[in-house]
Image (tube, grey):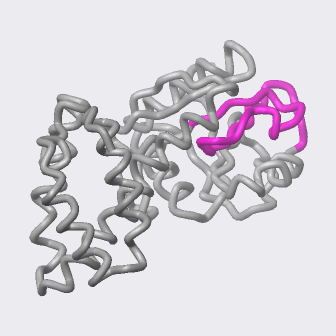
């Protein structure tokens, strides 16, 4: 059976379930769903569970084992053993998915499988959805997902800190967006060499003036500022 002869059931009404269903259909696959939790995936050759991590095991248990059935989850941090006795796979788009209409085209996608067939199907599904598959082993799942959280979730937390501080000066957050985009582009190209600013150039007097301003205007963020400043000093090779 070729990839496009497979019937795929997507279980989970959330943002990823919607986005993945749309992407797989656009890739020419027959897709049931997104279906609600508790669906048994009857008639499908592959069932993809787009449910919260804590619900994966229960959702997998609702699926009757049968010859040839592949069961996958879309969690970044969860290993394959949560899928029980099923021939298992996983695919995790390395992309923020803020809505069911999110475009996954071009996104990297972490894939894994409990068998050669499962690994091949996982990679093929990712490609059919317009993504670029790469392998992540079970032993590396937690570290991989932590890196994703730092790169995406923590970035939002950091920018909200900047927004709160900027608001005390009357500056809108949109004024900082070009700076953020340029910095991300520079990091993607140059890594640590993208670092600029007072810490990188050893201007500790300016850093202390910044710290005083944070302490005065956004004191709840002072510990965060101090932690970031110390980490940036290590990056720049500047003594504390």
Q: Between 18 and 6, which is closer to the camera in this rendering?
A: 18
Q: Establish if 151 lies above or below 102.
A: above
- What residue is drawn where x is 22% and y is 63%? 208
Give the x, y percent position of residue 156: 36, 62
Left or right for 179, reference 221: left
Q: What are the residue bounds of the magenta stretch?
A: 64-91
Left or right for 8, reference 147: right
* Placement of the C terminus among the 4 image quadrants: top left
Label total for image:
0
- Residue 11 lies in quadrant: bottom right
Q: Establish if 123 lies above or below 107.
A: above
Give the x, y percent position of residue 218: 32, 80
Q: Between 77 and 238, which is closer to the camera in this rendering?
A: 238
Give the x, y percent position of residue 84: 87, 36
- What residue is drawn where x is 68% and y is 36%? 46
Q: Establish if 46 lies above or below 226.
A: above
* Placement of the N terminus among the 4 image quadrants: top right
Q: Establish if 157 lies above or below 136.
A: below
Q: Is residue 58 magenta?
A: no
Q: Is residue 75 magenta?
A: yes
- Residue 119 lies in quadrant: top right
- What residue is drawn where x is 74% and y is 21%? 114
Give the x, y percent position of residue 50: 63, 52
- Residue 106 lies in quadrant: top left
- What residue is drawn where x is 33% and y is 70%? 161
Left or right for 77, reference 182: right
């Amino acid at each position: 059976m070729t990839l496009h002869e497979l019937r795929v059931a997507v279980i989970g009404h959330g943002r990823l379930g919607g986005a993945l269903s749309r992407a797989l259909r656009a890739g020419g696959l027959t897709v049931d769903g997104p279906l609600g939790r508790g669906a048994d995936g009857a008639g499908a050759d592959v069932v993809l569970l787009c449910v919260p991590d804590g619900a994966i095991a229960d959702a997998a248990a609702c699926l009757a084992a049968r010859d040839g059935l592949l069961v996958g989850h879309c969690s970044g941090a969860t290993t394959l053993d949560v899928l029980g006795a099923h021939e298992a796979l996983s695919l995790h788009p390395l992309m923020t998915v803020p809505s069911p209409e999110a475009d996954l085209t071009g996104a990297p996608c972490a894939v894994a499988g409990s068998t050669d067939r499962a690994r091949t199907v996982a990679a093929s599904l990712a490609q059919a959805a317009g993504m670029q598959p790469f392998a992540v082993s079970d032993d590396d799942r937690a570290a991989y997902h932590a890196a994703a959280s730092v790169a995406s979730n923590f970035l939002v937390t950091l920018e909200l800190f900047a927004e709160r501080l900027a608001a005390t000066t009357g500056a809108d957050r949109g004024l900082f967006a070009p700076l953020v985009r340029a910095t991300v582009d520079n990091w993607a190209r140059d890594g640590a060499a993208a670092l600029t600013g007072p810490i990188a150039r050893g201007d500790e007097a300016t850093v202390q003036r910044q710290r005083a301003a944070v302490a005065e205007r956004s004191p709840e963020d002072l510990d965060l500022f101090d932690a970031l400043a110390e980490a940036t000093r290590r990056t720049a090779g500047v003594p504390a």
